[in-house]
């Protein structure tokens, strides 16, 4: 309903304090620091991984839900992203529709097909693929049991209370990152350096988001590797990072001084701003599939130390 200027003057004379003005809040810098974000620590989803890779696991999803810690009223793994395992038994299928702009999948085990509208992606272990959200996706396992690792921006959509674009209007388009191509690109990186680099990251991108190095507005993703016996320098990111441990080889992460051992197919969530590093156990190269939460987050004020003039570099990846 549109209120006329005369009606508004009568309303204002009776209630000088407007509804809009009542919604305004004014916080000092100290108050902002206290309420900007829940204090969360690194977290390992090992129980959920064990359930997903149990031989008796039924077809269905296993959410990596940390909403009780994040304080959200909806399932969430980070502020803007929700990760889950999708188990598909051989010969079975599973359909789901995510209220999200993006559905990013990584094939951890098995092979199969995923259908959305009139598009199909055939995948196998080591592949990653992307679909727009909103429309149902039908997934089937074609050769043995399969497990997909799925990340969406459902928490962001829930927080904003917005609708998802139709399949035709979606900015995110179906995209297939072929595992064999990823392996070949990593080999090219190693060959170009003249020796196997200790650390190699391969970031995925997708039109129209390649200029930002992202697969979608809310997500950066890719493969991170660390050579046997290598140690990654301590660093931090301005975004929460979800890391799926693919090849552990006795490796571990150090997050804010605490050791987190890598477990096959488990997920480690490293909070934004947390100082962390990775260390290979020396039995072989470590591999992980990472997804970074590039969605809205509280502003972090950083003050340089006495010998620093700018914020330290934050390398993409884990």
Image: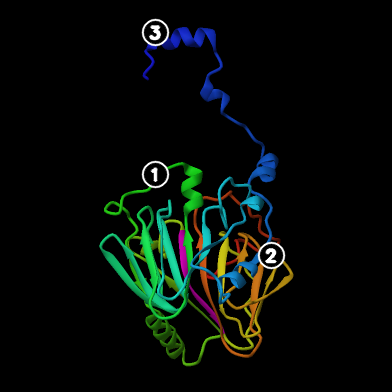
Q: Residue 154's x, y, as percent?
A: 48, 52
Residue that mark 2 sits on = 307
Foreground tag (3 vs 2): 3
**Relative to 19, does residue 112 appear above or below in the rendering?**
below
Viewport quadrant of the N terminus:
top left
Foreground tag (1 vs 2): 1
User: Looking at the image, is mark 1 or mark 3 earlier in the sequence?
Assistant: 3
Q: Residue 48's x, y, as percent?
A: 61, 67
Residue that mark 3 sits on = 6
The residue located at (50%, 11%) in the rendering is 12
Q: Circle 3 — which element?
A: helix
Q: Residue 248's x, y, as percent?
A: 60, 81
Alpha carbon separation for disc pair 3 and 2: 63 Å
Q: Nearest the camera: 122 or 31?
A: 122
The residue located at (56%, 64%) in the rendering is 241
Q: Is residue 169 left or right of residue 220?
A: left
Alpha carbon separation for disc pair 1 and 3: 35 Å
User: Looking at the image, is mark 3 or mark 2 earlier in the sequence?
Assistant: 3
Q: Nearest the camera: 115 or 245?
A: 115
Q: Nearest the camera: 182 or 140?
A: 140
Residue that mark 1 sits on = 163
Q: Is residue 36 left or right of residue 176?
A: right
The residue located at (37%, 61%) in the rendering is 137
Q: Is residue 314 visible?
A: no
Alpha carbon separation for disc pair 1 and 2: 48 Å
Q: Circle 1 — which element?
A: loop
Q: Is residue 262 visible?
A: yes
Whether 225 is among the magenta residues is: yes
The boundaries of the magenta stretch are: 219-226
Q: Residue 317's x, y, as percent?
A: 53, 70
């Amino acid at each position: 309903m549109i209120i006329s200027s005369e009606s508004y003057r009568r309303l204002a004379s009776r209630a000088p304090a407007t509804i809009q003005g009542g919604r305004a809040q004014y916080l000092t810098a100290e108050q902002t620091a206290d309420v900007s974000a829940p204090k969360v620590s690194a977290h390992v989803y090992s129980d959920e991984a064990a359930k997903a890779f149990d031989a008796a696991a039924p077809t269905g999803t296993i959410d990596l839900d940390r909403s009780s810690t994040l304080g959200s009223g909806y399932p969430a793994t980070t502020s803007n992203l929700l990760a889950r395992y999708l188990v598909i038994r051989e010969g079975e299928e599973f359909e789901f529709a995510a209220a999200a702009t993006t559905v990013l999948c990584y094939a951890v085990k098995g092979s199969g097909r995923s259908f959305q509208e009139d598009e199909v992606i055939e995948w196998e272990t080591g592949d990653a693929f992307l679909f727009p959200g909103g429309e149902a996706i039908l997934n089937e396992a074609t050769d043995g049991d399969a497990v997909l690792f799925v990340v969406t921006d459902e928490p962001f959509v829930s927080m904003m209370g917005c609708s998802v674009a139709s399949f035709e209007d979606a900015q995110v388009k179906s995209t297939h990152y072929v595992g064999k191509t990823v392996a070949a690109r990593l080999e090219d990186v190693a060959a170009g350096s003249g020796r196997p680099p200790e650390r190699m990251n391969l970031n995925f991108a997708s039109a129209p988001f390649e200029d930002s190095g992202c697969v979608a507005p809310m997500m950066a993703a890719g493969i991170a590797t660390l050579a046997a016996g290598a140690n990654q320098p301590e660093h931090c990111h301005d975004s929460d990072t979800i890391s799926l441990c693919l090849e552990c080889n006795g490796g571990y992460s150090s997050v804010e001084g605490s050791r987190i051992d890598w477990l096959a197919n488990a997920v480690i969530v490293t909070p934004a701003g947390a100082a962390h590093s990775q260390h290979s156990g020396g039995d072989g190269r470590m591999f992980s599939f990472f997804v970074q939460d590039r969605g809205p987050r509280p502003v972090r004020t950083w003050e340089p130390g006495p010998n620093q003039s700018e914020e330290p570099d934050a390398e993409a990846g884990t």
